[in-house]
Image: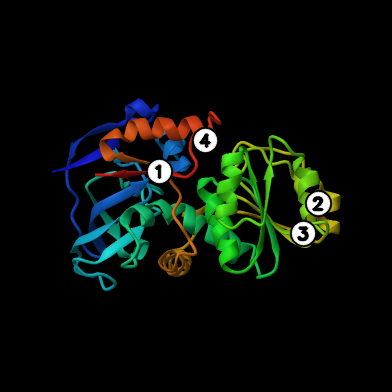
């Protein structure tokens, strides 16, 4: 048996129970990981709440991200051995069991070696948000050095990853922040220009910082304003959208196609194992050399998973603004 944070039916955060469930085993290509840290993502709260596009195991352990140490390996495992430190994401999705437990059984395809000088907390905090940023920036938008990128919310879970990765490859970054404190954080992460959206007109400020327009626009808002986005784009610019499931904004077809723009929408859990592995290689290198830093706002014991879910929801849906980074939990 093992301790885990799990649900037996979808609903509010208080539906999360913390208690003993069956400890998984590793067979075939699975790796049994003794969990050192997990981190929380908005998608975890949506799934717990019932936004399920697939059937969940019962009991369902919540969570996508994990980092820890290999405890056992299945007979077909070739990538890892007992004692290796690993991190991963994409669990708790597409019907897979989640990660908020003392042990997880994960197919080796979804795990990556953790660099020696990177902690489990940092690796877990960067996992889902890191691969999300990487896919959008490099697979889809093909960001180049010397290009200018605008990112909404430079201290958010994904936004902070986008900001740092763009700087790591030599791009110029314009980011927004909702307070002086968050603006300062963006500057520390390497932003070239920070716009306080509560005090400045965003559209004017972007064009003042990039009179020719931006090459890449990274949208994190739940209600994208496509008219405004298109107006600040440079010709042949690329727009990346990763949020706004219920959004149905007007689309400025004319200006969009006359500028020869491209629009990318994606969800990370539909990326292939090979695509995620190529993201992980860069993430590991950047974490190890310090050009990518985990943004951890709160660290809590796994037993407080319900409280953590409520805190995440208050920020994502309630716009409370009390988180500047990720919630990490440790068993």
Residue 185, percent across and down? 55, 48
- For the question of whether residue 58 can be seen, the reply is no
* Among numbered discs 3 and 4, the one appearing first in the sequence: 3
Nearest to the observer: residue 260 or residue 184: 184
* Cα gap from disc 3 to disc 1, whole angstroms: 34 Å
Q: Is residue 126 left or right of residue 214?
A: left
**Left-right relation of 120 to 178:** left
Residue that badge 4 annotates: 316
**SS type, badge 1:** loop
Residue under label 3, please give it: 261
Q: Are marks 3 and 1 in contact (CB under 8 Å)?
A: no
* SS for dot 4: helix
Name the element at disc 3. loop
- Sequence order check: which comes first, mark 1 or mark 4? 1
Q: Quadrant of residue 2?
A: top left
Q: Which quadrant, please, contains the N terminus?
A: top left
Give the foreground label among 1 and 2: 2
- Which quadrant of the view contains residue 216? bottom right
- Which mark is first along the chain, 2 or 1? 1
- Determine which residue is flagged by label 2: 208
Instruction: Tell me if label 1 and label 4 are in contact, CB under 8 Å.
Output: no
Q: CA distance from mark 1 to mark 2?
A: 36 Å
Q: Residues within 10 Å of mark 4 (few under 14, many from 20)?
A: some
| Residue under pointer 1 | 40
C-alpha gap between disc 2 and disc 4: 29 Å
In the image, 189 versus 166, the foreground residue is 189
Q: Could you tell me which secondary element the residue under label 2 belongs to? A: helix
């Amino acid at each position: 048996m093992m301790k885990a944070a799990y649900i037996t039916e979808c609903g509010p955060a208080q539906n999360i129970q913390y208690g003993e469930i069956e400890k998984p085993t590793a067979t075939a290509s699975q790796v049994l990981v003794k969990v050192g840290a997990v981190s929380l993502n908005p998608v975890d709260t949506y799934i717990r709440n019932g936004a399920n596009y697939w059937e969940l195991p019962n009991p369902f352990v919540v969570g996508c991200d994990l980092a820890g140490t290999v405890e056992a390996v299945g007979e077909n495992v070739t990538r890892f051995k007992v004692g290796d430190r690993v991190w991963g994401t994409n669990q708790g999705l597409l019907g897979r069991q989640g990660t908020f437990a003392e042990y997880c059984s994960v197919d080796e395809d979804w795990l990556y070696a953790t660099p020696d000088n990177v902690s489990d907390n940092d690796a877990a905090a960067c996992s889902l948000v890191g691969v999300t940023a990487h896919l959008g920036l490099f697979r889809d938008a093909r960001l180049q050095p010397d290009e200018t990128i605008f990112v909404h919310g430079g201290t958010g879970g994904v936004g902070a990853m986008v900001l740092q990765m763009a700087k790591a490859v030599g791009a110029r970054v314009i980011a927004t922040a909702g307070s002086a404190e968050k603006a300062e954080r963006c500057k520390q992460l390497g932003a070239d220009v920070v716009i306080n959206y509560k005090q400045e007109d965003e559209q004017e400020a972007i064009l003042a910082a990039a009179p020719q327009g931006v090459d890449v626009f990274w949208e994190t808002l739940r209600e994208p304003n496509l008219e405004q986005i298109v107006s600040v784009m440079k010709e042949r610019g690329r727009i990346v959208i990763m949020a706004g499931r219920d959004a149905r904004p007007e689309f400025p077809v004319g200006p969009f196609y006359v500028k020869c723009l491209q629009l990318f929408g994606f969800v990370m859990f539909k990326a292939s194992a090979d695509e995620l592995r190529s993201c992980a290689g860069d993430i590991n290198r950047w974490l190890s050399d310090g050009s990518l830093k985990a943004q951890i706002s709160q660290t809590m014991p796994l037993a407080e998973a319900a409280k953590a879910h409520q805190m995440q929801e208050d920020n994502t849906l309630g716009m409370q603004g009390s988180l500047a980074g990720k919630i990490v939990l440790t068993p």
